[in-house]
Image: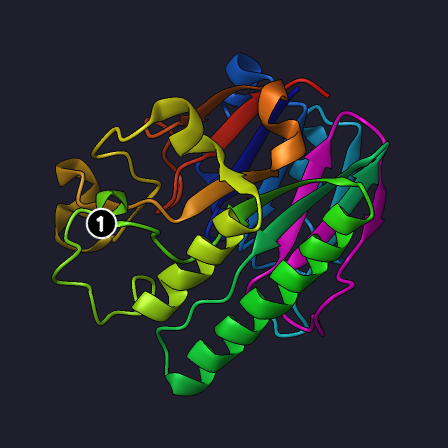
Amino acid sequence: MKLISWNVNGLRAALGKNAFSWLGDEKPDFLGLQEIKVSEENLPKEIFELGFKEVATNSAKRAGYSGVASLANFQTSVAKSLFFPDDEGRVLEHRFGDIVLFNIYFPNGQKDEQRLAYKLDFYKKFLAYIDELQNLGLSVIFCGDVNTAHKEIDLKNPKANAKTSGFLPIEREWIDEVVKHGFIDTFRQICGDVKDAYSWWSYRANARAKNVGWRIDYFFISQNLKDRLKDAFILSHITGSDHCPVGIEIEI
């Protein structure tokens, strides 16, 4: 299976830019979208014309904010969030066989200390939840915009951003914990310490053209899926958002 994740920064805007024209070449079996910024009632009809058999959404109560959508060519049972009060439309959980697949738009902590605390609480509760799933013998895949770069290699200017949410030690330590708990950063597993590989660029200062970016979009898999992982990639040539798609190929 080919699984792809993409923060589209507004689904209607992305559709208006013909930003999904690459789907015919990539042919993903699953596409997890974050920050769709549209309610389920107002979901554009074009999303149902992209060639997927199933479409699931979780929209924020606040209009024009957050939200996730999952498009799949296989049947899953879907839950919106089982570990965190989710008024912001951040989580879609898919179960099929012994696999639990998450499409998540993790909170951004840059606004203020309160939002940073919210982000860290979300992180903590999510890790506890996927630990429980592992203890039940289930395999876990989670993808999405994690809103944190893990190591210095994962952003262009680590020293300049050492006190910026998204690269704070306390945020990066959470990803350390994810790895300690047996989850694998698929991109690093496949690509090693390749440099200048990013998934998000600011709209300011011509950052994308200069490749001044951050790698904050991920696929993590549980240890028991390690031998099934065949590829991991960043589709940095695809435009239409300030993020680009990331993905994996895995035997399921």
Q: In the rendered structure, which segment of residues is drawn in magenta?
A: 65-93
Residue at the spot 17% in from the left edge and 47% down from the top edge: 156
User: Residue 222: horizontal and vertical position, in percent?
Assistant: 63, 39
Residue 248 vertical placement versus 98 (above, below):
above
Tell me, yes or no, whether the highlighted magenta stretch contains residue 50: no
Amino acid type, callout 1: Glu
Quadrant holding the C terminus = top right
**Residue 170 image-quadrant placement:** bottom left
At 53% from the left edge and 60% from the top edge, which residue is drawn? 106
Q: Would residue 27 be found to the left or right of residue 49 on screen?
A: left
Residue 200 at x, y percent in the picture: 33, 46
Q: Main secondary structure of the magenta part?
A: loop
- Residue at 45% in and 35% down: 245
Camera-nearest residue between 40 and 114:
114
Q: Residue furthest top?
A: 25
Residue 132, quarter of picture? bottom right
Q: Is residue 7 left or right of residue 52?
A: left
Q: Under tag 1, what secondary structure?
A: helix
Q: Nearer the viewer, residue 217 or 72?
A: 217
Task: Using the image, determine if residue 163 lies above or below residue 228.
Answer: below
User: Where is residue 198 shown, x and y percent of the image?
Assistant: 30, 39
Which residue is nearer to you in this view: 25 or 29? 29
Q: Looking at the picture, does residue 97 appear above or below residue 9?
A: above
Q: Is residue 68 visible?
A: yes
- Residue 202 appears left or right of 90: left
Q: Is residue 155 above or below residue 251?
A: below
Q: Position of residue 192 (x, y in %)?
A: 33, 27
Identify the coloring: rainbow
> What residue is pinned by disc 1?
152
User: In this image, 251 relative to 211: left or right?
Assistant: right
